[in-house]
Amino acid sequence: GNSVTQMEGPVTLSEEAFLTINCTYTATGYPSLFWYVQYPGEGLQLLLKATKADDKGSNKGFEATYRKETTSFHLEKGSVQVSDSAVYFCALSGSSRGNKLVFGAGTILRVKS
Amino acid sequence: NAGVTQTPKFQVLKTGQSMTLQCAQDMNHNSMYWYRQDPGMGLRLIYYSASEGTTDKGEVPNGYNVSRLNKREFSLRLESAAPSQTSVYFCASSELAGTGALNTEAFFGQGTRLTVV
């Protein structure tokens, strides 16, 4: 079945550092890929998405590129801020009818000032 | 825009009590989900409904039942609450995958924090 594996955390960075959170997936066909963010005490919200190979999703300075050859969708940001401290989830939506969403385990990001 | 609305936001139950968590979405989505989130465990799928009239078990369905009342509403019932069900519960909805829709991302409610004592 479909699955998502993302790097374990927590990840602790200083403000303005470069961020990478790795995400790889297993799926048949051509899934859509997502990154969600969860701020403390809140629900999950979509951060960015990509629906086909080589697409780059971007939002709020975060980017991720859909790499079918490496089955990856790594999240990057050039300069993190304290306000980016949150839990980040990688997810996929399968291309077969009725496929449910599949989430990774989540990565806690802590940014220190 | 309301999006996905969950009620209640907080609840304390005694062991053995029952309750129903309500979820409604106003985006005309076909698919709806119930997840639980425990510290260090990420999101775990309890039940989902790919479309109105269908429900399927997820990873952790034991101790729960669901009802897809109509296209908008998807409720989660705990028949006899146990301390192990203390968690934060999230409802989500999305377009049905595999139908050509590109926007299959999920939209989440704000969560229900449930404590069973």
Image (cartoon, rainbow, N blue to C red):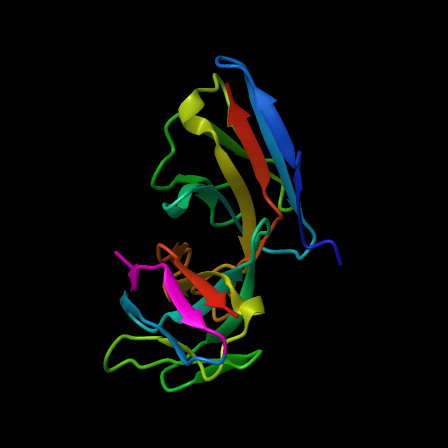
Q: Residue furthest top?
A: B16
Q: Look at the image and tell me whether residue B75 can be seen.
A: no
Q: Residue at x 41, y 71 (%)?
A: A13
Q: Is residue B98 left or right of residue A26?
A: right
Q: Is residue A3 left or right of residue A78?
A: left
- Please determine whether, in this image, residue A23 is positioned above or below residue B70: below
- Please determine whether, in this image, residue B7 is positioned above or below residue A93: above
- Please determine whether, in this image, residue B7 is positioned above or below residue A100: above
Q: Look at the image and tell me whether residue A11 can be seen.
A: yes
Q: Position of residue A6 (x, y in %)?
A: 31, 63
Q: Position of residue B69 (x, y in %)?
A: 61, 36
Q: Is residue B6 left or right of residue A87?
A: right
Q: Is residue B59 left or right of residue A70?
A: right
Q: Residue at x 62, y 48 (%)?
A: B110
Q: Residue at x 29, y 59 (%)?
A: A2
Q: Return the residue nearer the eye: A57 or A42.
A: A42
Q: Is residue A8 magenta?
A: yes
Which region of the structure is painted magenta?
A1-15
Q: Return the residue nearer the eye: A90 or B27.
A: A90
Q: Position of residue B53 (x, y in %)?
A: 52, 41
Q: Is residue B107 magenta?
A: no
